[in-house]
Image (cartoon, rainbow, N blue to C red):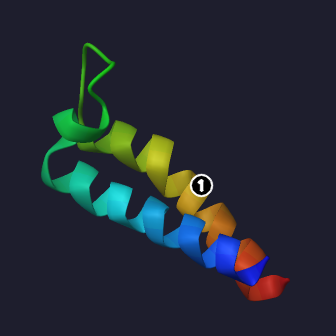
Amino acid sequence: MEVVLKFLISVAALSVIIGLYSPWRMLWWMSRQNRLLVLKYYGVPLVILLLIYLFA
């Protein structure tokens, strides 16, 4: 379980980093790409996974 959480956290963190650099790479399916949407779609799951990992 711990390995899976670490993997998901690292994937979400990498997605946020890539999305903040160039949002169109992570939000290619949307007509409008901006950094706030990247934080919404990838940052929220990252925070939730980090909280689960830290407090579980």
Q: Position of residue 39 (x, y in %)?
A: 40, 49
Q: Is residue 39 left or right of residue 48?
A: left
For the C terminus, the image quarter is: bottom right
Residue 55 sits above or below residue 46 on the image: below
For disc 1, the neighbor class at 10 Å (few under 14, some 14 to 19, many from 20) is some
Query: Foreground: 33 or 6?
Result: 6
Query: Foreground: 50 or 9?
Result: 9
Residue 47 sits above or below residue 33 on the image: below
The number of callouts visible is 1
Q: Position of residue 17 (x, y in %)?
A: 27, 62
Q: Is residue 34 left or right of residue 9?
A: left
Helix, strand or loop status at disc 1: helix
**Residue situated furthest right in the rendering:** 56
Residue at x-position 26% and y-position 44%: 35
Residue 38 sits above or below residue 51 on the image: above
For the N terminus, the image quarter is: bottom right
**Residue situated furthest top in the rendering:** 31
Q: Position of residue 54 (x, y in %)?
A: 72, 86
Amino acid under label 1? Answer: Pro
**Residue situated furthest left in the rendering:** 22
Q: Which residue is mark 1?
A: 45
Query: Foreground: 35 or 9?
Result: 9
Q: Is residue 50 left or right of residue 2?
A: left
Q: Position of residue 40 (x, y in %)?
A: 47, 43
